[in-house]
Image: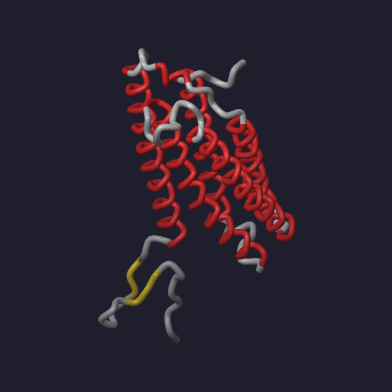
Amino acid sequence: MAAEISVTDSFDDRGGPPRPLLPVDRRVKQGGWLFLLSLFVFFGATLLLYAIYAVSRSDDPLKLVPLPKTFLVSTVCLIVISFLVHAATRTVRRDRFHATAWLLGISTAAAVIFTVIQCLAMTEILLGPATFEGPGRGVAGMVVVLAVLHALHVLGGIIALGIVTTRSGIGMYDHERHWPVDFAAHYWHFLDLVWVCMIVTFWLTTGGFGF
């Protein structure tokens, strides 16, 4: 009778005995955490360089550009998205498939709204007096650049949320296999943290929100 083989083993390509493999889930998790770590280093270094640049332009009148109040609206929207996706990690562990799919779907829609609001805010800065003569002038231009960088990563998060939502809707996740949902939550928590740090830094290095 053939010997039973563990699900974590595979046959050698040359037909030899089975060899142990690192579980796929563990490899995916390791890749996910390394990806988030690399993004953390990237945004941390970028924000530090911006702060140094803003301090060096302390005598530039364009530095006092007012921030659009829509940035505050988008911040609230981002926090709501992070909360919804985190709630989805709770429902999927309880095998509440419909609730998980709904939470992820609403999160995806809110992420699209966040992106639209960010585009309106960046347009307001670009059309304002500090950058009217051309984008990229002084601190105001750097604010737009950083906001665009963050928005690009948000677009990646929207695509990921769409995929996870679709797969959740057809029952691909349960209390045992739900790492993609967890990773979506981790990613949006990361985007949330980065944006809050950006908003605080912008507030301290520009004209603020007028209050």
From the top left corner, tell me how far across and down residue 73 is, in percent.
Answer: 64, 34
Q: Residue furthest left?
A: 14
- For the residue pair 1 and 143, the one nearer the viewer reads as 143
- For the residue pair 101 and 119, the one nearer the viewer reads as 119
Q: Quadrant of residue 72?
A: top right
Residue at 50 percent across and 18 percent down: it is 207
Q: Quadrant of the N terminus?
A: bottom left
Q: Is residue 52 above or below residue 34?
A: above
From the top left corner, tell me how far across and down residue 71 is, in percent.
Answer: 58, 32
Q: Residue furthest front?
A: 133
Q: Residue furthest bottom?
A: 1
Residue at 34 percent across and 32 percent down: it is 45
Q: Is residue 159 left or right of residue 8?
A: right
Q: Is residue 59 above or below residue 203?
A: above
Tell me, yes or no, if residue 93 can be seen here: no
Q: Quadrant of the C terminus?
A: top right
Q: Is residue 14 left or right of residue 204?
A: left
Number of numbered discs: 0
Residue at 65 percent across and 53 percent down: it is 104
- For the residue pair 155 and 131, the one nearer the viewer reads as 131
Residue at 43 percent across and 57 percent down: it is 28
From the top left corner, tell me how far across and down residue 69 is, in percent.
Answer: 61, 28
Tell me, yes or no, if residue 27 can be seen here: yes
Q: Residue furthest top?
A: 59
Name the colouring of the figure: secondary structure
From the top left corner, tell me how far across and down residue 136 is, in percent.
Answer: 37, 34
